[in-house]
Amino acid sequence: MLYGYAGKILTINLNTGKASADHIPEDLARDYLGGRGFVARLLYDRLDPGTDPLGPENIIVVATGPLSGHLLPGSGKTHFGALSPATGGYGDSNLGGHFGPTLKYAGYDCMIIEGKADQLSTIIIDNETVKIVPDQGLKGKGAIEAEQELKERLGEDYQLLTIGPAGENKVAFACISHDFGRQAGRTGVAAVLGSKNIKAVAVRGTKKIPVFDAKRAQEKGEEMYKVCFGKPGFKTWTPFGTASITDWANEVGAFPTRNFQTSYAEFHEKINGQAIVDRLLVTDKGCFGCPTPCGKYGHTTTALGSAYVEGPEYESIATLGGSCCLEEIEEVAYANYVCDQLGIDTISAGVVVSFAMECFEKGVISAEEVGREISFGSLEDTVYLLEKIAAREGIGDVLAEGVKQAAAIFGDGSESYAIHVKGLEWSGYECRNAPGMMLSYMTADVGAHHNRSWALGYDVSQSDADVSELIEAGTGGKLEISTPDGKVDHVISMQHSRPLFDALGICRLQSMEIGFETFHYEEVFELITGRRLSWQEMLAISERIWQLTRQFNVKHIEGFGRDWDYPPRRFMEEPVPSGPNEGRYISKEILDKMLDEYYEKRGWDKNGIPKPQTLARFGLD
Amino acid sequence: MKLTVKEERCSGCNVCRVVCALHNAGAVQPSQALLKIKGEFPDPGTYKIAYCNQCGICADSCPEDAILERDGEYNIDYELCTQCLICIDSCPFDVMVVTESEYPAKCTGCGKCVELCPRQAVLADQG
Ligand code: SF4
Ligand code: SF4
Ligand code: SF4
């Protein structure tokens, strides 16, 4: 018996309309834990080279971890993966909320969706019963709107995943939406759902998850909450959530501004965590099991309209606020709301829109092509572009493929400021004085995402301080040049530790933001699963997953290698024009040295391809 | 312990429900929890907490007088309970559940939800 797990994988075949439940293979749980590990292994095994990300042969894997749904802090995370339409390689993204725990209560750790429904449909899972229901009534509806409608129809007990028009139209950065404001935003998993004609997935679960030692697991879980309650960051970080970091990111010159032209925004205090609390906040909104709810649910009013919206969280502040230069928090929140309804990832959306704004500013695209004049700082232009993208109308059809593809079409030097790696738009940290963070983005398996390694704190402080401590310490107004020394090791270690949370099915923020100690997870893991693994041993599993996703990219992306690991030229050639990091950039020579060291330490060849003996070492040959 | 709530503090985490079910039903199974959280989204964006305030209406409905009051708390005497489940529907807050062995269950006043709610949204009623 697999304690801690629900025990089953649910496979839903949309071609036949049939669902089947199979036992989780014990070696899969042993070698890959769950969540991201399940996603990576199942995608690797099931997808052949040459698969079209938007064809019926692509699959979507939804996976919880062994700790999801249990009594412990942050146990609400769910992982999603598919061959990514944004990168053509490994794609995954996760969300919090309540979906994953409920899927487990329905009896499934993992769900695989394959094939294609012949018309737009909703999957409804009620414990053992699985139905695929055609539902044209939801066509074109906003992701939040569709969730609201389905909640009313099905009842409060159901947890929902929905996509918006952008997902239906297969926008490369469409997101899966859940719980009125939580998204699996990255890598375009919702476009894959849309390509399969699935508008929504609903789940209700009333069963129990077996626990190895329920009594002691309960005691340990209770203790873990109480330890969290006692952390200083519990009180200081929670009120502002991820937006806490906005001022600090500016102070250290890492705040993407004007399509990453510069790394400091004068107006940052108008869009920071305090602005959210003062001007938007209705309630703190957390995920399942969360002691430190980072969701700031609020209400915004702008010239374009008013709306309820969760967030904006830091990433949306950075890309919609900083990169598109929306200077008031109400505007950032409204753009966030528009993205949420359309079902597009706010990170990519902000980067794509600001890219278009810069292209227009530089005369690369004309008012005629765009359909109007556009400029940084305009909410109206931002919303105009977002709607065009979701509908794939005019210029929106080009932008819907993301900045990499758009730059290839626009040309005229726009590649150097198309801010992405591997085709995935860069998230909210500018890195021209942050070599560790730069390398993190360059080598992340999914493309330019901070979820895998966040080395910025280390770049700035040369310490392992958690985020609350970094913010508390500040820089004292002094910002040294951050050197590459020691960064490669740090990045590698973070690329194992952060994604490990995704494999366990839990939130990393209690650990990363308020300093909750990892040994607690070892203890509770043993009481829940009956399996003794040290954190180090779990990190070794995370390392195996890292090797596997690299190999996945080798398998699926033609000609994959070193060239896929560079940032845009802007970061290697253009000195930052203003702010604390004025004059700085990191040359290609320095990055090449870092890549050489990184590949060497990873056991990859000079081109970044895992060597056969490396794969053998992780049982991947 | 008699409960009271401050709904404006609730973040919807459901920790109260997980610990309630674990403590009272011995399982990780929030559908067995003896209180409920309902999110009202997108508008007005708040949470409602349905909980037992020890009103005793279940006791009044019980044909066997199997729900007994002691110091303001009502508890089911499972020796007397005949599993008719009439009490379940009588609860005005819909916070009684049927256990796997088909007995009714109601809030026992154990206070676990109060102890673990990260937001102090469920509290002991001092008045
Ligand atoms: S910290 Fe945020 S993301 Fe993590 S569990 Fe809490 S609400 Fe969810
Ligand atoms: S007091 Fe105990 S039984 Fe009652 S709702 Fe809270 S945890 Fe459940
Ligand atoms: S534990 Fe507290 S904050 Fe969480 S859902 Fe229950 S009442 Fe709300």
Image (tube, coloured by chain):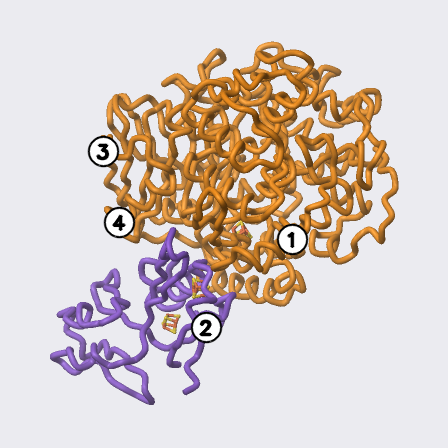
Chain colours: A orange, B purple
Q: Which residue is mark 2?
A: B114
* Residue plotted at (33% across, 30% down): A198
Report x, y in % for residue A611: 68, 18
Q: Which residue is mark 3?
A: A133
Disc 4 to disc 2: CB gap under 8 Å: no
Q: Which residue is mark 1?
A: A244
Cα gap from disc 3 to disc 1, whole angstroms: 42 Å
- Do discs 3 and 1 belong to a common subunit? yes
Cα gap from disc 4 to disc 1, whole angstroms: 35 Å
Front residue of this view, candidates A76 and A71: A76
Cα gap from disc 3 to disc 4, whole angstroms: 16 Å
> Mark 2 near ligand 2 (CB under 8 Å)?
yes
Mark 3 or 1, nearer chain start: 3
- Do discs 3 and 2 belong to a common subunit? no
Amino acid type of the residue tagged 3 in the rendering: Val
* Residue plotted at (30% across, 52% down): A157
Q: Is residue A395 above or below residue B38?
A: above
Q: Secondary structure at mark 2?
A: helix
Q: Residue furthest bottom?
A: B71
The mark found on residue A152 in the picture is: 4
Q: Is A620 left, or right, of A71 in this rendering?
A: right
Disc 3 to disc 1: CB gap under 8 Å: no
